[in-house]
Amino acid sequence: MPSSAKSSSPQYSDITAAAERLSDHAQVTPLLESDLLNERLGGRLFVKPEMLQRTGSFKFRGAFNRISRIEQAERAAGVVAYSSGNHAQGVAAAARLLGMPALIVMPRDAPEIKIVSTRAHGAEVVFYDRLTENREEIGERLAADRGATLVRPYDDPYVIAGQGTVGLEIAAQARNAGAQLDAVLLPCGGGGLTAGSALALAEDCPGAEIYSVEPLGFDDTARSLVAGDRLTNDASARSICDALQMPTPGETTFAINARLLTGGLVVDDDAASAAMATAFSQLKVVAEPSGAVALAAVLEAVFPIKGKTVAVVCSGGNVDAQAFRAALDVEG
Amino acid sequence: MPSSAKSSSPQYSDITAAAERLSDHAQVTPLLESDLLNERLGGRLFVKPEMLQRTGSFKFRGAFNRISRIEQAERAAGVVAYSSGNHAQGVAAAARLLGMPALIVMPRDAPEIKIVSTRAHGAEVVFYDRLTENREEIGERLAADRGATLVRPYDDPYVIAGQGTVGLEIAAQARNAGAQLDAVLLPCGGGGLTAGSALALAEDCPGAEIYSVEPLGFDDTARSLVAGDRLTNDASARSICDALQMPTPGETTFAINARLLTGGLVVDDDAASAAMATAFSQLKVVAEPSGAVALAAVLEAVFPIKGKTVAVVCSGGNVDAQAFRAALDVEG
């Protein structure tokens, strides 16, 4: 797998190799469980809290795995990435760890905490207008100008393999807990977390169904899975789930997801907010709206788990205090 | 160590035995770290997030270890406990797991989430007035009436040993992270978590200083350590740290703490609130005021960690949404 092979598909062995590379740098997040949630849902629910990951989301996994593969001769020119803020922080932290400069293209309306943290991790930030400009074009141009390596947020085999370590950990931790998973639900934007984890789970947890979960209006993967082809979202769609607003599934990620996923689920913003409040009160973790959609699918019985054993990934917790307070108003 | 020996002191081997008993029931909480906090503090800070423990605080550890030692013949009569709410939930959940009824004496002004959750774990709750009534007397009378086993919140060797598994995990996890701890700071009420963890750390992490951290006005352990004798708090003291308001250090716990602690630290309510906000923004975990005091001691430089490697325990996250929102206002 050459480091420039953008569209080559990762294999299971790439995920175990990523886990090896990440072992001294990423947090092995636990698999949480709540007696009271289990009772309420009539099933057994495991929650993988990736807000506890370095930089507050799973994105550090893929970013570090990718950036650590950059040849020594190319490192001085640094990396460029475009991101709504979680990939941004993952790339910034990984680049700094590896001694490389990072330039990140972020939407002007990204949550304040994501912008502040990306800069605090030592990255330079340039803004674009999410509704009128094309971030891929800006990122590619800036990378070319600097001779820097563009670290794509999901359509990269090393990024997918890095995110896949989430699935690898879930399979091992569920086994250690004596549980046989019936299903695993994952928040889905470009599809990197879902695709990587699906590759790991297909091997290590072959009986489990795998579902992507998306916010209403950004259900491109759900519809694409049905159509068997990559569809796009309506440009007028809006959601509080700022990390899951991709125009269409990734090419490499969708090829994997189309093969391995049982289906795609969709939840609305109110469900995401309510799940943030439940994560607060029952699990004691801070979920951002995008991070809470898979939990929301279970709580709202979009995917009922009565009599089942199910794992959901909470993918991130980078949310401004004001937005978090608003979510707590829903329940509290 | 007979199960009725209230005042006998636990040993290191009691903690490893507790860890064994807890292995299928308690969460092994991770050791979290934040690049940005480390940078800000100029040291290496590990956070042990016990809000992720079953029932939302470390208290499940001691409660399960104690209740699992109750003889079969005594189980039908159940358990009685008094608690501001975290020991309450730990006892309720452990008793239910072991098939025993639980009756908990709680202050009428305990946080709503603690009362609701204790009942949700299947316990019967009776209230008392924290400022005018004696909870020990009420608990002992109710236990005697029912022939039930009284599960004391800290002055019990099995409870102390159970809480000590926190220290056992910290030592092993810091070692795995390649870190040598200079100090460990623990929230301290009656002193069970501190004493148990100190016993574990003295053996597994002998170079580390160990400090209790208490809220202003409830610094009985700090003052008692200096005096070499168990002192009491002023009855007029008030704090938002509802879980750390004991009148005086426990007898068994203080004997251990006096021998093993370097000293006792004190933080005020504002520092606890600010630490809750930092736990939210940097660590993505929900800390209750009492749970945040050790983190607060580091953040406010009551205990500066520049150039040091230090672990703090965040002991619980059972906080009402309204109180949490108020804490976020401080920072956000």
Image (tube, coloured by chain):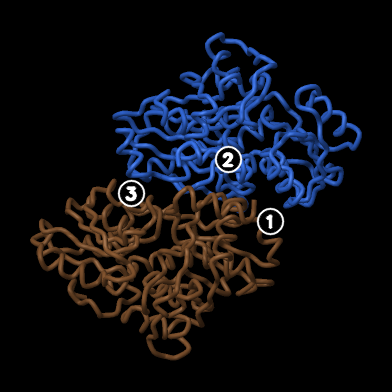
Chain colours: A brown, B blue
Q: Is residue B235 visible?
A: yes
**The label number, if any, that marks residue A36 in the structure image:** 1
Name the mark nearer the viewer: 3 or 2.
3
Q: Secondary structure at mark 2?
A: loop
Q: Position of residue A243 (x, y in %)?
A: 40, 64
Tell me if residue B61 comes above or below residue A9 in the rendering.
Answer: above
- Mark drawn on residue A117: 3
Q: Marks 3 and 2: same chain? A: no
Label placed on residue B316: 2
Distance in Å between CA atoms under marks 2 and 1:
17 Å
Q: Residue at x 62, y 53 (%)?
A: A282
Q: Position of residue A312 (x, y in %)?
A: 53, 66
Q: Is A2 in front, or is A305?
A: A305
Circles 3, 1 touching at the beta carbon (< 8 Å): no
Mark seen at residue A212:
none
Pick the residue in front: B232 or B100: B232
- Quadrant in the picture for residue A148: bottom left
